[in-house]
Each structure stands twice: as C-alpha cells, then as structure tokens.
Image (spheres, rainbow, N blue to C red):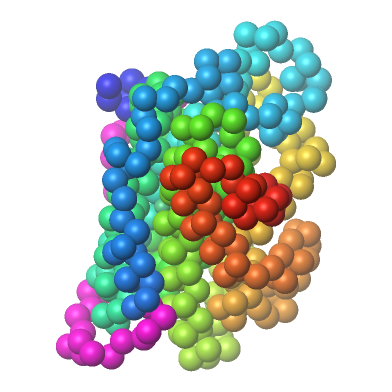
Amino acid sequence: MSTMYRYALPVELTEWKFDGAVETRFTWEYDDERQGLLALYDKGKKQQWDAALRIDWSQDLDPENPMMLDDRLIPIYGSAIWDRLTDKEKVQVRHHQQASTISQFMHGEQGALIATAKIVQSVPDLDSKFYAATQVMDEARHVEAYSRLLHEKFELAYPITPGLKALLENGLSDNRWDMTYLTMQVLIEGLALAAFQRLRDFAGNPLAAAVNAYVMQDEARHVAFGRLALRDYYPELSDAERDEREAFVVEACYHMRDRFNQWEVWERLGLPAEECVQVLMASDTMKQFRTRLFSRIVPTVKDIGLWGPRVQKAFEDMGVLSFGEIDAQAMLDNDGRVAEAFDAKKRVADVIGSAAAD
Ligand SMILES: [Fe+2]
Ligand SMILES: [Fe+2]
C-alpha cells in the first residue's frame, strides 16, 4: 500500500527537491590507493547481504508494544500526562512513538543513500569512490528494510521531521565533499548508530532487533570510512577552514539535541505537545538517554581532528565530553560481531559480554 496511506500526518507533496550543488570529479590516477580505504572497500564487497533473505520477515510485531520496548524508554513515561492515559491510549502511544522513530530512520537512510551517491561523484580519489559505491548499495538496503518494517508490520509511518529535514538540507546543499561526509558519515550516522543500538540491544521483538543489528554492521563500516577519509584530510586545512567545520559540528549537535523531540507524535495523539516536550527535556532518564546518543559522535569528532576549544566547550556543556575517551574502533568492531551473533541466533551478551547492552 502506498506510503501516502500509511502516514499518520498529511503529507502535501510526494517529493522534495532542492539544489544540492555538486562538483563532478574524475580522476585519471588509478593506482594511488590507500590501504586502509581499500581494506574497507574489500570488506564492503564481502559483507553485502540481501534484506529479503537474511531477515525472517515471517515474524510479527507485538500488537500491544510493537518492538517490545520497556515503557521507561518512552519520553513521557512516569509523567502526569502518562499516568492519565488509559491502557488503550498507552498502546497507541507505543505504536505511534515507535513508528515515528523507525520512520525517521527510513528518511535518514534515504538521505544517506543520496549523500553517498553524491560522494561517489564529488570525492577526488578513486579508493574513496570505490568504497562509497559499496555504501550506496548498503543504504538502498537500509531504506528497503526500514520501509518494509513500517509498511508491512507497523502499517503506519510519519513524515520526515523539520529538524531532520533542516540538517539534511544543510549538509546536502554544500558542494564541498568533506561537508557531505561530516554531516552524514560522522554526525547523522553517528547519532543513528546510537539510536539503532538501543533498539538492537533492548527490543524484545526479534524482528526489530535483527533489522537494527544488520543495519549497524554496515553503519559501522560507514563511520569507519568517514573517520579514515577525514583524518587524512582535516590536518591539511588552514585554521580558518577547520574552525568553520568545528562551528558546524557545534551547531549541528545542539540542533540534534534540542530539536529531535517527537513533537509531531504528541500533537497527532492529541496530547499537550509543549508539556510533553518539557517533560522530555526535564526527565533525568531522558537526559541520560539524549546524552548517550552522542556516544558515537564525540570519539569520531575527536579522532578526525576537529577538537579545538569551541568543540570541547560545547561537548562539556552538553555533558558528553567524556565520550572522547571511548575507543571508537573497538565499538565499531563489536557492531560487526553482534550482527554475526544474530545470524547464529546467539545471545548478544554471550558473544561480546555485557558491554553491548550498556
Ligand atoms: Fe544506512
Ligand atoms: Fe550508512
């Protein structure tokens, strides 16, 4: 059934167009290759998978709580608004809130698909073009998997939020190739990895957990690609050029922290949206959760050398500076192992210890 019939809110247009200025670059150097990037390309080729086959789509979601998530993960849980809801209304909140989350994953994945195609076109070196080509296929598969989950299982979808839309438009209308990487591979995918991880590790529903585990296996490679490419490039920039990137990182991180509040869901369900967002901003559990969303971004930003005083001050203000100490590569390696554990139907904790569920 057409997505237009699945949207919980009216969507006026079926497409979104803007001028994503892009410079097209060919290279005539076919033999100047960086081993790190080529190794990732090789991994990208070997780890291709088919979403229709690797995932068991005969499994269903739970009618009362689709992905079987703990209610404490609902931003308004425990508030006066939540306590006033009947059991039937709580079921509706779970359904809509979870469908809205997966919908933003789906739209974000389409952003990644477009961004990666743009990287193939605009990045100067052949090794990066090769790698990005494998990522284009990965992102198509991610759109397919989340879309299928929404259409066939949730039977509900939400339009893209203004916050995600603004971030995508900003990153995709800059014609400098590194800005596409920075927006997509470091910031949006970094945030997404933390959000996917929460579902992979805490969803009691095996279908929802598996979709996220497999997508994460690919995303871990994507973030590694962004790190490798930018770590080589940023030291070559002037202080002023680096400073511009740092200002962008700070602005985007505040944007993601403050504007991703599921306003549309509260409004659609007839709840007092402003009050819901106030609850969400004030609750300690939600503060902790929003902090953890940056656990994947901070170490990568540090690693690629955008670690000037402006960035450190902002991360300190957001309470996320200590994530800079995390071993980013170890986390990414774990993501690959967990996906393999899903294939073998083993318990995640048995494969990588309790760290996976932190
Ligand atoms: Fe993706
Ligand atoms: Fe990705």
Horizontal side of 84 relative to 107 (left or right) equals: right
Instruction: Answer whether residue 170 is visible to the viewer in this image.
Output: no
Residue 99 drawn in magenta: no
Image height of 87 relative to 244, above or below: above
Quadrant for the N terminus in the image: top left
Instruction: Answer whether residue 129 is visible to the viewer in this image.
Output: yes
Residue 242 spot, x, y in % from top left: 55, 82
Residue 272 spot, x, y in % from top left: 68, 22
Horizontal side of 280 relative to 163 (left or right) equals: right
What residue do we see at 30% from left, 79% from top?
127
Horizontal side of 168 relative to 123 (left or right) equals: right
What residue do we see at 73% from left, 31% from top?
72
Q: Viewer-proximal residue, 31 or 304? A: 31
Image height of 76 relative to 50, above or below: above
Q: Residue furthest left?
A: 28
Q: Which of the 4 quarters of the picture holds residue 51?
A: top left
Residue 93 spot, x, y in % from top left: 61, 21
In magenta, the rendered stretch is 9-37
